[in-house]
Image (cartoon, rainbow, N blue to C red):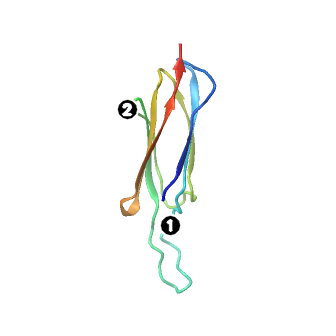
Amino acid sequence: MTTAMILVPRTPIRSGDVVMLKAMISHPMETGYRRSEKGEEIPRNIIRRMICRYDGVEVFSVDMHQAIAANPFMSFGVVATKSAPVEFEWVGDNGFRHRQSAQLNVTG
């Protein structure tokens, strides 16, 4: 089962503040270039894209390739405008798709 961790600031956030959002997902990120102990090719299995939406609007996305490490971690800044959900979506090979969200609470 896939697990993801999303970190949003717990300290008071004011409208207009730039906040750091952090997300990590557990995933092996197999490149497709390795072989098993029996010499068989291990098929590629990577997360190809991560998208972050704040209040339903895409604010960050990244395309990933074989060089990304297992359990990819992303951190980026967003201007907080109002209290709303922050939704992350990861899409990968073999029909992989995982969504998770957290609440960003903004005052003033």
Q: Nearer the viewer, mark 1 or mark 2?
A: 2
Per the image, label 2 sits on a secondary structure element best described as: loop
Q: Residue at x 37, y 64 (%)?
A: 94
Q: Earlier in the sequence, mark 1 or mark 2?
A: 1
At label 1, counting other C-alpha atoms closer than 10 Å, the crowd grade (few under 14, some 14-19, many 20 or more) is some
- The kind of residue tagged 1 is Thr
Which residue, given by chain and number where applicable, does mark 2 sit on?
56
Q: Could you tell me residue 107's position as x and y percent?
A: 54, 17
Per the image, label 1 sits on a secondary structure element best described as: loop
Q: Residue at x 56, y 83 (%)?
A: 37
Q: Position of 73 compared to 102: left or right?
A: right
Residue placed furthest toward the top: 108
Report the front residue among 34 and 9: 9
Q: Could you tell me residue 42's position as x and y percent?
A: 48, 75
Give the CA distance from mark 1 to mark 2: 32 Å
Report the front residue among 15 and 34: 15
Q: Residue at x 36, y 60 (%)?
A: 95
- The kind of residue tagged 2 is Gly
Report the front residue among 28 and 4: 4
Which residue, given by chain and number where applicable, does mark 1 sit on?
31
Q: Quadrant of residue 67?
A: bottom right
Q: Could you tell me residue 33's position as x and y percent?
A: 50, 72
Residue placed furthest toward the bottom: 38
